[in-house]
Image (spheres, rainbow, N blue to C red):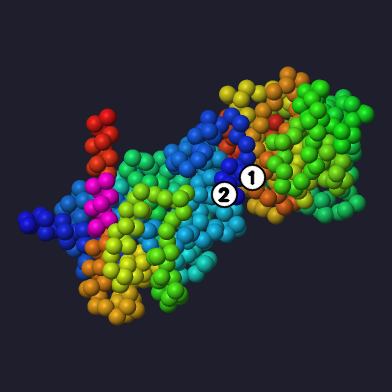
């Protein structure tokens, strides 16, 4: 065995110690020296072996605590937000990242700060039972109902509305908390059913944001905190080209950091009249919905909006 | 809950259809696809949490570590190369780096808190079908072929983060023997994985 072989074997031994966090002080110096002499030594290969061996020796994973999952999702939203950092160092050792400070993780979401004062007022508003809007079976503006909505037909009742094109006879299933809203039924019909079944559902009107796409927007958003289901009814919201941009809903929750509103899903407006009912698909549980905001984002949506294009807002005002 | 139930709809996402099943997520995560990010948390969160819990002194410390590890995952997602290894191993490497870094900084270990019955987890570690991973399977074969005391020593070091000295005290073997046991196990797995990688590259080159 040559000297090089012996030194590489020694380097491997020390590298294993290093990967276990078990290098003694004198060994650290020796390890560093050997690494400098053999820059081509593949530490990553050894790391993968240790990782595979660890996985082989581990019991099946424990469930991830829900609160931690939410924190991870929030961190990800911050990371993949508008100020996303990039890595350029391709050296394997440089894969060991610098410790991320909490301050770094926080991003200045100034756009939403303007909503903070409103949020305070909304908390008070929402907690007052006498001010809770009682939903109606009929939309406040029947003319605004989309063609497929049973609201356009006064004779329709929640029990008899049908989904799909006129003439179809698919009877709506009963409302169930676990039913994925908007997937099994026509959103417009499901919205009516939700309103009929839940007299205390939250009901807010849309107003225009800063983007011309929402200049003439009206309609409303309904949200049932008990079943975590809700629908957005839009009139006058500009039709979008899904290949270029999409609408994305954000839900402000009084129980969450206002910098990180809940993603309510990406959607399109396909009608030239801008009349559409869209199911809300919140990716997290909504505690107390304070405000709903629709932004215009790239196709597929974003983790964090840069808030530059706001099509519509819905709150108590 | 299945992964596909957890993300909001992305009707226009070109990546959505590619993020299904058990295929690699990190290349999609690297593009910032929120569906893939959520799926990644769902898929690997329990694994990272389990690793961190065993290599951290307290649950709170483990939670902080998991957050840091996932930030590392987001940062390095673009560097993942499926041809060089599995996603699970890649993420475990990142987790180990972060945790050992924290252990060094904190100079604390979980040794005294490690329940003895966890030492027997090696035999209970057979993965589910969904979790099967060639590299891990090979490592498991290596592990199970080792004498029981060596299996135990490796688990105490890699899974539970005990120092060599702590392991020596616990199992009543000389420190040098402990080091040798761990080293041989890791190097054996490295040799097998390197051989498999070369074989795979050769096979691809021949196609």
From the viewer's perspective, tell me whether residue B5 is left or right of residue A61: right
Q: Can you tell which mark lies on residue A53?
A: none
**Quadrant hosting residue B124:** bottom left
Residue receiving disc 2: A73
Q: Are marks 2 and 1 in contact (CB under 8 Å)?
A: yes
Q: Quadrant of the N terminus of chain A?
A: bottom left
Q: Is residue B173 magenta?
A: no
Q: Residue at x 27, y 46 (%)?
A: B196
Secondary-structure class at tag 1 = loop
Q: Position of residue B185 (x, y in %)?
A: 27, 62
Prevalent SS, magenta region: helix
Q: Position of residue A267 (x, y in %)?
A: 66, 31
Residue receiving disc 1: A283
Count the labels in the image. 2
Q: Residues within 10 Å of mark 1 (few under 14, many from 20)?
A: some
Q: Badge 2 sits on which subunit?
A: A
Q: Residue at x 78, y 39 (%)?
A: A173
Is residue B190 visible to the viewer in this orientation of the structure?
yes
Q: Badge 1 sits on which subunit?
A: A
């Amino acid at each position: 065995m040559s000297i090089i072989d012996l030194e590489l074997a020694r380097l491997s031994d020390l590298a294993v110690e290093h990967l276990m966090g078990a290098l003694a002080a004198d060994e650290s110096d020796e390890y560093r020296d050997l690494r400098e002499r053999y820059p081509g030594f593949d530490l990553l290969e050894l790391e993968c072996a240790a990782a595979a061996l660890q996985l082989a020796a581990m019991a099946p994973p424990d469930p991830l605590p829900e609160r931690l999952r939410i924190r991870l999702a929030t961190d990800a939203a911050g990371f993949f937000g508008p100020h996303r950092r990039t890595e350029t160092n391709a050296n394997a050792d440089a894969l060991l990242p610098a410790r991320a400070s909490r301050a770094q993780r926080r991003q200045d979401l100034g756009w939403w700060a303007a909503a903070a004062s409103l949020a305070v007022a909304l908390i008070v508003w929402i907690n007052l039972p006498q001010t809770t809007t009682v939903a109606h079976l009929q939309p406040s503006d029947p003319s605004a109902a989309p063609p497929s909505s049973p609201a356009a037909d006064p004779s329709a009742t929640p029990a008899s509305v049908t989904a799909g094109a006129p003439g179809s006879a698919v009877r709506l299933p009963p409302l169930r908390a676990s039913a994925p809203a908007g997937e099994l039924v026509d959103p417009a019909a499901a919205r009516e059913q939700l309103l009929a079944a839940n007299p205390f559902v939250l009901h807010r009107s849309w107003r225009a944001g800063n983007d011309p796409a929402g200049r003439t927007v009206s309609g409303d958003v309904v949200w049932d905190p008990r079943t975590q289901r809700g629908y957005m009814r839009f009139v006058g919201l500009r039709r979008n080209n899904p290949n270029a941009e999409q609408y994305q809903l954000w839900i402000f929750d009084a129980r969450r950091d206002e910098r990180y509103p809940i993603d309510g899903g990406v959607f399109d407006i396909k009608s030239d009249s801008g009349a559409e009912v869209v199911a809300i698909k919140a990716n997290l549980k909504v505690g107390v919905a304070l405000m709903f905001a629709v932004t215009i984002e790239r196709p597929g949506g974003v983790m964090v909006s840069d808030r530059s294009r706001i099509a519509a807002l819905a709150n108590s005002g | 809950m299945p992964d596909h139930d957890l993300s909001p709809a992305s009707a226009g996402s070109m990546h959505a259809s590619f993020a299904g099943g058990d295929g690699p997520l990190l290349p999609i995560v690297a593009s910032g696809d929120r569906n893939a990010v959520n799926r990644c948390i769902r898929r690997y969160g329990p694994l990272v949490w389990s690793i961190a819990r065993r290599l951290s002194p307290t649950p709170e410390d483990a939670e902080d570590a998991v957050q840091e590890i996932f930030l590392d995952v987001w940062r390095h997602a673009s560097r993942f190369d499926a041809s060089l290894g599995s996603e699970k191993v890649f993420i475990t490497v990142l987790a180990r780096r972060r945790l050992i870094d924290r252990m060094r900084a904190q100079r604390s270990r979980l040794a005294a808190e490690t329940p003895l019955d966890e030492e027997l987890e090696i035999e209970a570690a057979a993965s589910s079908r969904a979790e099967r991973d060639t590299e891990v399977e090979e490592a498991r074969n290596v592990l199970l072929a080792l004498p029981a005391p060596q299996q135990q020593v490796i688990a105490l070091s890699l899974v539970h983060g005990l120092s060599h000295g702590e392991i020596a005290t616990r199992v009543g073997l000389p420190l040098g023997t402990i080091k040798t046991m761990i080293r041989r196990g890791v190097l054996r797995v490295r040799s097998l994985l390197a051989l498999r990688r070369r074989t795979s590259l050769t096979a691809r080159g021949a196609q």
